[in-house]
Image: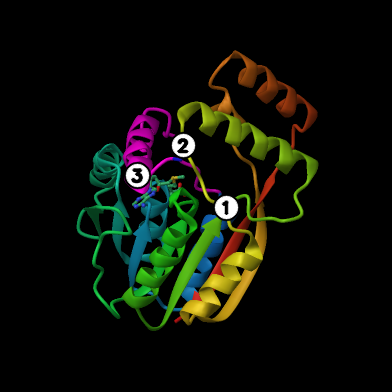
Amino acid sequence: MITKSEHYKRMIKYWNSQVKVSSVFKNDSQIINKILEVIHKRKCKNILEIGCGFAQDTIIIAQKSGCKITCIDFSPKMIEKAKIHIKKEGLEKQINFILDNILDIKLKENFFDGVIAKLVLHHLFPKDDIILACKNIFRSLKPKGIFILVENWANSNPSKYETLAFQLSQRARKIKGIKEVFLNKDEYLKVLKKIGFSNIKWAFIPERIELNRYALNEILRVDVEKTKLNFPRGKIKNLFIIATK
Ligand SMILES: C[S@@+](CC[C@H](N)C(=O)[O-])C[C@H]1O[C@@H](n2cnc3c(N)ncnc32)[C@H](O)[C@@H]1O
């Protein structure tokens, strides 16, 4: 059984190593458009983004919304790369970075209009850490502030393609010695309600995923190719939640 501190050590190492392969800027994402729509509707000005990676979403959100964004990520390499992108786009005054684990950081209370956590909470381990992070997010929001949560593999009724893609992702993670914790939609709703969030809305948004990133070794590569061939238009449904403080 892996300890919590060993888990986070491995995760930071893993995400540092992912910098080399994380380079695709996709600005046509349905999810990003939905995030922008919510930010605009709720008139957010001051946003916190958790697990920003190399800031591919951050840049689009900053440019299209004009919001000030604080980004947190615990991978020094991701933040290093994010800062290069931000500088290239001339967004240094609008975006600032904090290198830390969302579980360790003491966030300002009642401060942000919105918090975004896209594809990050499943990296927390064990499950109680997901709850702790959500409590930390709740405290950091102003009253009526919004939490935008996006998670994959939260669909309890997956299609054949989703099941195969999930299995590939898990086999690839196992090879890397990485653990992930997936809550389904109902579990997330329950956690958020218990913390005190209200007016919780959710949807599943289908998106394509890049299966090639799971092709770590020969066996996986063959299965990735087979899956791509059998499901050339395969999409996975990402859980999209908006919750209000
Ligand atoms: C799958 S990437 C998502 C990046 C971006 N949000 C997106 O959707 O493209 C997950 C990111 O979260 C970061 N991360 C994972 N666990 C974290 C934690 N406990 N605290 C801070 N950052 C974390 C990783 O370093 C990585 O950059």
- From the image, tell me which residue sits under label 1: 182
Picture residue at 51% right of the left edge, 45% below the top:
180
Residue 192 in magenta?
A: no
* Element class at badge 2: loop
Bounds of the magenta segment: 2-28
- From the image, tell me which residue sits under label 3: 8
Picture residue at 36% right of the left edge, 60% below the top:
49
16 or 27, nearer to the observer:
16
Amino acid bearing label 3: Tyr
Left or right of residue 78, residue 241 in this image: right
Q: Is residue 184 above or below residue 198?
A: above
Coordinates of residue 164 in the picture (x, y in percent): 72, 35
Q: Is residue 29 above or below residue 140?
A: above
Left or right of residue 62, residue 160 in this image: right
Residue 7 in magenta?
A: yes
- From the image, tell me which residue sits under label 2: 178
Whole-number angstrom distance, CA of label 3 to CA of label 1: 16 Å
